[in-house]
Amino acid sequence: MSKIAKFLISDFKRDWSKPSIKFFRSNGAYGYIIWLTIMDAYFEKIDLTIEKTVNDVENYGSRRTALDFINRAVAGNYIKKINSDKDRRKIFIQPTEITIKEFSEWADEFIEGIL
């Protein structure tokens, strides 16, 4: 367990050159949770709505804060919004290729760091 804690401490202190990771992790708990939620949904092939994402982080930031963060992530090209074909009121979010690539690299480093 100590190895995991040490890796996470050094990982948080590190100056990240990966812009998507730096973006998501520089916005407190809600940014980190949104990042991990988006990536989990992507790899599990689950359609993730903005509404679900905002509700998941309500204990860590206001609704407006979460929506503003999501819009900044879209503007930064870290995630994309996709309108539902079945219900135009639903908007899904997915990571962009850069976010997927950087998350995968980070995950590989994480696994190597704790083994």
Image (spheres, helix red, strand yellow):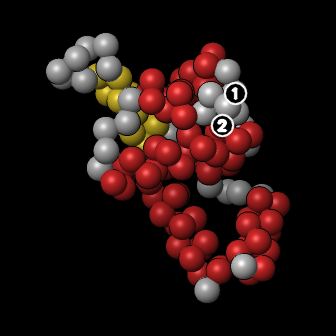
Residue under the point 52% across and 58% down: 103
| Residue occupying image coordinates x 67% and y 31% | 59
Asked if one can make out residue 104 in the rendered structure from this viewpoint, the answer is yes
Quarter the N terminus occupies: bottom right
Point 72% across, 37% down: residue: 27
Q: Residues within 10 Å of mark 1 (few under 14, many from 20)?
A: some
Mark 1, secondary structure of its residue: loop
Q: Nearer the viewer, residue 65 or 19?
A: 65
**Label 2: few (<14), some (14–19) or many (≥20) C-alpha neighbours in 10 Å:** many
Res. 30 mark: 2
In percent of the image, x 60 and y 44: which residue is there?
33
What is the CA distance from the residue labelled 2 to the residue labelled 1? Answer: 6 Å
- Vertical arrangement, residue 101 with respect to residue 69, above or below: below
Residue 56 position by quadrant: top right
- What's the amino acid at mark 1? Gly
44 to 93, vertically: above or below:
below
Q: Which mark is residue 76?
A: none
Return the x and y of residue 24 as percentages of the image width and height: 63, 43
The C terminus: image quadrant? bottom right
Whole-percent x and y of residue 77?
Answer: 49, 36
SS for callout 2: helix
> In the figure, is residue 23 to the left or right of 35?
right
In terms of sequence position, does the residue under pointer 2 or pointer 1 come before the other?
2
Residue nearest the viewer, comparing 16 with 50: 50
Pick the front one: 13 or 114: 114
Circles 2, 1 touching at the beta carbon (< 8 Å): yes
Q: Position of residue 15 (x, y in %)?
A: 77, 58
Looking at the rendered structure, the kind of residue marked 2 is Tyr
Q: Position of residue 93 (x, y in %)?
A: 40, 33
Q: Which residue is mark 1?
A: 61
In the foreground, 93 or 18: 93
Q: Residue furthest front?
A: 59
